[in-house]
Image: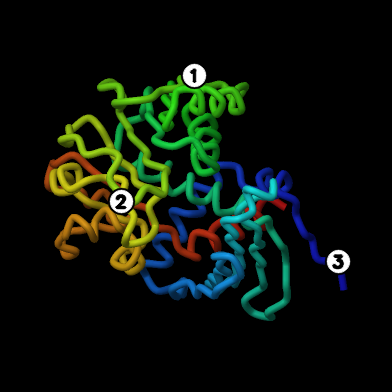
């Protein structure tokens, strides 16, 4: 029996190049919508001091995966990452383990890949993007934008211009133009990506046809990054329609009519018909982790 490969964060990232990962997520989205991927709601178990253990399995005819992630909010004060975890990949026919990937790296890259799919399908190739937030997910989105749209301008908004500047300094050397920002979004930004865990809207401008809004950070019903003006004035899309009904706080708090909300597959297949500005909400699901595992196995 051969040794099971356990990849570091750097090795995991190398196995998940964004062009291939985006294609893998697009294929998984169609599989998930057609019932070829089973991805139940995540199980959440308590850990000490407000931490949680998240269990997220998914199965398909070719592989099965299990993402097991621990989120410990008190780790920052200890100089430790807030999130630890792994994604295990298995052969579906035999159940034999194939690969273990770094969980936080998988999450960051597959989440960014979902956003890139939204941009690719719901907006023209952007030249100017605004990121709201300067955390781990923003770093993943900078890497994705740099890989898919070289030379793009990326405005990074944070609570203070100093924190935005520090973030930009850490992301230098990727072939994009990074600008630290604080305050309103530049009117020229064609895509605005919200990447915070805010409990109240941080963006509520009247939607405009030449700007795509992408919501990523809010993943609980009590969280909201986009306000009702932005939500109700937009044609709405979500990555996971089932999960969004419980987790997309932006939409839940705005009281959207879920019958009008389209899926990622609707976007991929061009079923965007009402002509309004577009808002894409990502809540994530284990199907996207399965897509990442497929990609990683294919790159081996």
Question: Which residue appears at 33% of the width and 43% of the height?
Answer: 214
Q: Position of residue 162 (x, y in %)?
A: 50, 23
Question: Which residue appears at 52% of the width and 22% of the height?
Answer: 165
Q: Secondary structure at mark 1?
A: strand
Q: Are marks 3 and 2 in contact (CB under 8 Å)?
A: no
Query: Which of disc 2 and disc 3 is earlier in sequence?
Result: 3
Q: Seen in the image, is 97 located left or right of residue 108? A: right
In the image, which is nearer the foreground, mark 1 or mark 2? 2
In the image, which is nearer the foreground, mark 3 or mark 2? 2
Q: CA distance from mark 3 to mark 2?
A: 44 Å
Q: Nearer the viewer, residue 183 or 192?
A: 183
The quadrant the N terminus occupies is bottom right
Q: Residues within 10 Å of mark 2 (few under 14, many from 20)?
A: many
Q: Residue furthest bottom?
A: 94
Residue 224's disc is 2
Q: Are marks 1 and 3 in contact (CB under 8 Å)?
A: no
Query: Which of disc 2 and disc 1 is earlier in sequence?
Result: 1
Q: Secondary structure at mark 2?
A: loop
Question: Which residue appears at 37% of the width and 38% of the height?
Answer: 193
Display coloring: rainbow
**How many marks can you see?**
3
Q: Circle 1 is placed at which residue position?
A: 177
Q: Residues within 10 Å of mark 3 (few under 14, many from 20)?
A: few
Q: CA distance from mark 1 to mark 3?
A: 43 Å
Q: Is residue 94 above or below residue 251?
A: below
Q: Secondary structure at mark 3?
A: loop
Q: Position of residue 69 (x, y in %)?
A: 60, 64
Q: Position of residue 62 (x, y in %)?
A: 58, 71
Q: Circle 3 is placed at which residue position?
A: 3
Query: Which of disc 3 and disc 1 is earlier in sequence?
Result: 3
Q: Is residue 118 visible?
A: yes
């Amino acid at each position: 029996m051969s040794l099971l490969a356990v990849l570091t964060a750097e090795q995991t990232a190398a196995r998940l190049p964004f062009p291939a990962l985006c294609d893998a997520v697009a294929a998984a989205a169609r599989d998930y919508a057609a019932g070829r991927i089973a991805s139940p709601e995540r199980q959440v178990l308590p850990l000490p001091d407000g931490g949680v253990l998240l269990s997220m399995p998914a199965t398909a005819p070719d592989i099965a995966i299990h993402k097991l992630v621990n989120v410990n909010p008190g780790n920052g004060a200890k100089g430790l990452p807030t999130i630890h975890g792994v994604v295990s990949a298995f052969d579906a026919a035999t159940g034999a383990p194939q690969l273990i990937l770094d969980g936080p790296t998988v999450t960051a890259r597959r989440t960014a890949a979902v956003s890139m799919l939204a941009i690719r399908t719901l907006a023209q190739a952007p030249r100017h993007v605004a990121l709201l937030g300067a955390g781990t997910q923003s770093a993943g989105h900078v890497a994705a934008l740099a890989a898919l749209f070289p030379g793009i301008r990326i405005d990074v908004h944070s609570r203070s211009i100093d924190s935005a500047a520090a973030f930009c300094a850490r992301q230098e050397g990727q072939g994009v133009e990074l600008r630290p920002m604080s305050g309103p979004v530049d009117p020229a930004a064609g895509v605005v990506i919200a990447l915070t865990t805010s409990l109240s809207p941080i963006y509520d401008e009247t939607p405009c046809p030449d700007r795509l809004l992408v919501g990523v950070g809010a993943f609980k019903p009590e969280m909201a990054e986009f306000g009702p003006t932005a939500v109700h004035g937009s044609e709405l899309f979500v990555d996971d329609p089932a999960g969004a009904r419980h987790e997309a706080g932006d939409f839940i708090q705005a009281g959207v009519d879920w019958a009008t909300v389209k899926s990622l597959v609707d976007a991929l297949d061009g079923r965007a018909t009402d002509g309004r500005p577009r808002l894409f909400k990502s809540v994530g699901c284990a199907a996207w982790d399965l897509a990442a595992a497929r990609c990683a196995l294919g790159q081996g």
